Amino acid sequence: MAADTLTSSEYIKHHLTNLTFGQHPDGSWGIAHNAAEAKAMGFWAIHLDTMFWSIVLGGLFIYFFKKVADAVTAGVPGPLQNFAEWIVEFVDTSVRGSFTAKNDLVAPLALTIFVWIFLMNLMDLVPVDLIPFITGWLGIHFMKVVPSTDPNATFGMAFGVFGLMLYYGIKVKGIGGFTGELTLQPFSSKNPVVQGLFIPINFLLEFVSLIAKPVSLALRLFGNMYAGEMIFILIAIMYSSGVALGLFGGFLQLGWAIFHILIITLQAFIFMTLTIVYMDMAHSEH
Amino acid sequence: MNINLTLFGQLLSFVVFVWFTMKYVWTPIMGALEKRRSEIADGLSAAERGKHEQVLAEERAKKLLVEAKNQAAEIKSQGQKRASEIIDEAKEDARAEGDRLLKAARAEIEQEVNRAREQLREQVAALAIAGAQKILQREIDAAAHKDVVDSIVKQI
């Protein structure tokens, strides 16, 4: 669309730039006009598009489920309630299958993760140029509509899960048990001197594996969605290269979108399942 | 692709959504599911109980029917017995009455016979006397010859 006036690489770069609000290097606050300006804002900037879409989608999720929960009946459920119950039962079954301890937080956590991530991923199926085109008319030039292609969003969630893992790990096992898990295994010895030598090695191994959990959680989702988005953008470039290539691109986009339905559901499911498993590990003693 | 404040914005909204879901969504929906599950379980067990009771009632009805049949047969046979008894009694009564009537008739007949015989005897006696009077052609003192006459009467 914009490719008439832009080169392909500019087009791609344009699509991968968030609508960033922050402090310009000259001290004034405002929206970044290009990727370089956004980068120059440093840490104290915020992606308005990521925040907007994720909160809208999360709001949609809680609005729908709150509506069902308010009118919930143990009798014959309506179609909306039926649908909500189907999702709730699915999440509940997953939680019961993997989470053995007793914690009323885990199931709602899993439900939120699953539906929210699914909705954020679902935005990937909206044609890449549609919403940026509309907002372009309204004067907003950067618009990334898929929050889960922003590492801030995926890391935000992953750190939330990580925080809960640490909290419950320490709450259930105590400080001693928690640090013991980090330092006294996998290598242990009855000899105190050897054990002392093992502690730093154990800590190195266990700490890396502990940190790897939220990082892999966030990067897996981000990587999948970012790659998917990238392919949609590349297909979209074809539309500017004549009718034949454009038609071919249309087929490609359709095919990729259908395949992507699988990916977005799968990624939401993986994030949810791993969260449940990590929470279970935080609750169980070795 | 810059890591910035959005991270905390997302973290915060994530926490809020989870909190909201836990507080206002999960509990009522799971409550309804749980309630429905227990209602269905109750319904099923009630149906099971009803079926069991039906079987029991059928058995009871069958037993009652058999009892009633037995009773009816008993009453019938008792009735028949009583009827034949009544008939026998009636026969007995009739026979006795007949016998009585017969005896009375016989007695009456005998009485009549005796009376006739007595009359006949008297007449014969008178005839004999008359005959004797005629034969003898003379008056016989009836009183004087009463013993002879009586012996003749007795011989008749």
Image: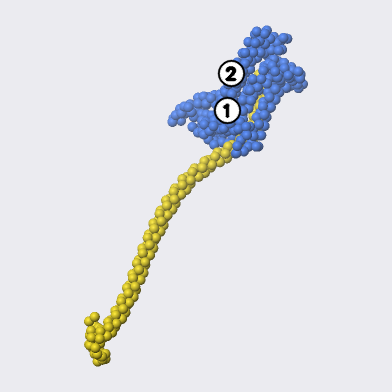
Chain colours: A blue, B yellow
- Which label belongs to residue A259? 2
User: What residue type is disc 1 on?
Assistant: Met
Q: Position of residue A9 (x, y in %)?
A: 67, 10
What subunit carries mark 1? A
Residue type, mark 2 in image: Phe
Residue A273 rendering spot, x and y as whole percentages: 55, 27
Tag 2 and tag 1 share a subunit: yes
Coordinates of residue A89 in the picture (x, y in percent): 57, 32
The one nearer the camera, A71 or B27, is A71
Say if A15 sits above or below B5 in the image. above
Q: Quadrant of the N terminus of chain A?
A: top right
The answer to which of A266 and A280 lies nearer the viewer is: A266
Q: Nearer the viewer, mark 2 or mark 1?
A: 2
Q: Is residue A258 visible?
A: yes
Q: Nearer the viewer, residue A158 or A114?
A: A114
Position of A30 with respect to B41 (left or right) is right
Q: What is the x, y in percent for residue A152?
A: 65, 23
The chain ID associated with circle 2 is A
Q: Quadrant of residue B79?
A: bottom left
Q: Quadrant of residue B110?
A: bottom left
Question: Whole-Å distance between the Cαs marked 2 and 1?
Answer: 20 Å
| Residue at the image position 65 percent from the left and 8 percent from the top | A244
- As helix, strand or loop, the secondary structure at mark 2 comes to helix
Residue at image point 53% right, 42% down: B42
Q: Please give the residue where the numbered disc 1 appears in the rendered image.
A: A272
Q: Residue A100 or B33: which is nearer the viewer? A: B33
Asked if residue A150 can be seen in this view, the reply is no
